[in-house]
Image: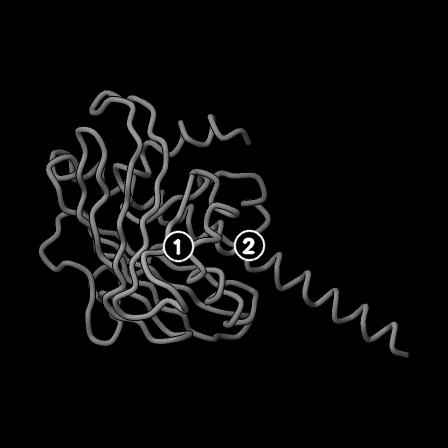
Amino acid sequence: MSRARTAALSVPLVLGLLCAAAAPAGAAGAANSPAPHASRPDTPLTCRGRGVDPDALVRHRTEVVIAAPLRTVWKIQTDVERWPSWQTPVESVQRLDHGPLRKGSAFRWTMPIPPNPSTPATSLEITSTVRQIERDACLRWTGPAVGEGLRIEGVHVWTFTRVRGGVLVRTEETHTGAQVEANVPVATRLLREGLEAWLHDLKSEAEAEAQARAGAQAGARAAAR
């Protein structure tokens, strides 16, 4: 898929998703893997006791099982500077600190946004700050997405749990801001599409990496015989 095509499709993700930069949910290969599915909205996710904005009108929660080791899923998700390699609409990611992602870590990332009925063409700049984190278990970050004529404040929570067959990844996000609150049903639908697209891409990347590692290990064992 070309970058121009993906950027055009990412418009609703921006209006409906602060911290997602993912290919569309119908991307090639989606039919070959279990689709993410929404979970109960009345049981908000938390990381170290903190969750999404309880007063936000726009919110969604969804989850997927990824057939990969927990360490692989965690590394891909938290190595934010690698996001452009598996989330096509992300143009750049800049860590504002160094070392492993931790409480207080911040990163700034950008994506191009073509014109739409609500806003002109712009480059969206998203600054995310990690508020809570527990290694291999959960993440919670907050921050604004800002572009010409557009500002969204978001809170995003992720949890990671070992289950039979891999890792259950759950994510929940809330948005506030004049643009999304002007049409809550549409903003909520777009948020859902964006979160599910992100999970689809995370699943694809993690499972491909796990399969490649397993193949390399099998080859090494065969060579050693």
Q: Position of residue 100 (x, y in %)?
A: 41, 69
Mark 2, Cα crowd under 10 Å, few <14 / some 14-19 / many 20+, is: many
Q: Amino acid at mark 2?
A: Glu
Proximity of marks 1 and 2: CB atoms separated by less than 8 Å: no
Q: Is residue 154 left or right of residue 204?
A: left
Q: Residue furthest bottom?
A: 225
Q: Residue furthest right?
A: 225
Q: Nearer the viewer, residue 166 or 220?
A: 220
Of callouts 1 and 2, the N-terminal one: 1
Which residue is depicted at the point 23% across and 66% down?
131
Q: Viewer-nearest of labels 1 and 2?
A: 2
Q: Element at badge 1? A: strand
Q: Is residue 5 left or right of residue 12?
A: right
Q: Which mark is residue 37?
A: 1
Q: Nearer the viewer, residue 207 or 109?
A: 109
Report, in whole angstroms, how far the alpha carbon at label 1 lies from the one at label 2. Answer: 19 Å
Q: Position of residue 26 (x, y in %)?
A: 48, 38
Q: Element at badge 2? A: helix
Residue 118 to residue 36: above or below: above
Residue 128 to residue 134: above or below: above
User: Which residue, given by chain and number where applicable, does mark 2 sit on?
Assistant: 205
Q: Position of residue 217 (x, y in %)?
A: 74, 71
